[in-house]
Image: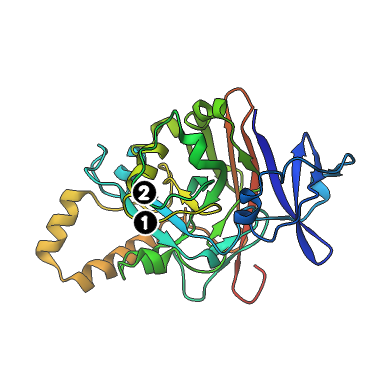
Amino acid sequence: MGSPLVRFAKDSRAAWGVLEGDAVHELTASHESLGRLLEDPSALDSYGVDGRPLAELELLSPVTAPCQIVCQGLNYSSHRQEAGQQQARAPFNMIFSKPASTLSGPDQDVVRPPGVKLLDYELELGLVVGRSITGPTEITNDNLHEYVAGVVLTNDVSARDVQIPQQQWFKGKGYRTFCPTGPVLYLLEEGDVPRVLDLDVELRVNGELRQKANTSQLLYGPAETLTELSGLMDLHPGDLVQTGTPGGVALKAPSAAQQRIARALFSEKKIFEMFVERQASNPDYLKDGDVMELRATSSDGVVDLGVMRTRVVPEGGSP
């Protein structure tokens, strides 16, 4: 069985701890970044006997800067359908990125930028790279635990009125606090891989269930995606790979046929103006004061990534 790890504020610094039940045992090893912690083979060997109650701690993102955040898009059939795409697996794996400055803690507020009205949520399972990958590498479910140190909850928060009209995914998803992460980084052992490939995930807004899926529904699985990325880029310990979101987001795009008709009749500027106007009437987009709650667990309860609970606030003030 693997190790659930958390990162928390202690005095004026960040500390790491192993979670046992509802108690956190602080690691003796002190590393500022997750990458350095993962490169220390003895980091988990020594920790305090007396635990501190989890509920009393200010939890921080277990994924730390500097790191790369690599993302997958349209990787569940249910999300492809609501995004106006065919439900079948696409012939290519959609890859993009987010800046590390989007990282925020599992209880930290998500800050809505001025002018953004179509703020959306995207529940995602995050893979944390455990060893450097600097060339083409064949990664399979059998050796996945050798390259993925652990898994973590993430929320790929998105400003749709920036992402879609400007056709800039990096910009629309790249604002500070747009990647809440944690609370638990579950460090894998070999026997945990089948559980990671069969996790139940869900997201609620103000208690209302919006997204519910299982990671077995991923169109491009973790091993296949990491194999593809290995032929493209270098990955290092502590880097984060988001695996895509299931259906249930606020965004509801026209069908592919409707999009083709619109392109034949209207200018691109007019199409995006109509998009924003139509989406503005959708009550599912996040509003100031809304609370998002995310969970991910295996059916046997061994892998439990905790509960992420974040609130939306406007920049410069409280709702």
> Residue 120: x and y, percent?
46, 57
Local crowd at mark 2 within 10 Å, few (<14), some, or many (≥20)? some
Query: Secondary structure under badge 2?
Result: helix
Residues at marks 2 and 1 touching, judged by CB atoms closer than 8 Å: yes
Q: What residue appears at the point 42 percent right and 39 percent down from the top-left corner? A: 222
- Closer to the camera in the image, 29 or 280: 29
- Closer to the camera in the image, 145 or 90: 145
Amino acid tagged 1? Met
Q: Quadrant of the C terminus?
A: bottom right
> Residue 237: x and y, percent?
54, 52
Q: What residue appears at the point 46 percent right and 49 percent down from the top-left corner? A: 242
Q: Is residue 282 visible?
A: yes
> Residue 208: x and y, percent?
56, 43
Local crowd at mark 1 within 10 Å, few (<14), some, or many (≥20)? few
Side of 141 where 1 appears, left or right: right
Q: Quadrant of the N terminus?
A: top right
Amino acid tagged 2? Ser
Q: Residue furthest right?
A: 50
Q: What residue appears at the point 19 percent right and 70 percent down from the top-left corner? A: 268
Q: Residue furthest top?
A: 300
- Occupied quadrant, residue 224: top left
Q: Which mark is residue 65?
A: none
- Closer to the camera in the image, 92 or 269: 92
Query: Secondary structure under badge 1?
Result: loop
Q: Which mark is residue 233?
A: 1
- Occupied quadrant, residue 34: bottom right
Side of 276 where 88 appears, left or right: left
Instruction: Please name the residue that numbered disc 2 is placed on.
Output: 230
220 is higher (above) or lower (below) than 255: above
- Occupied quadrant, residue 109: bottom right
Q: Is residue 221 visible?
A: no
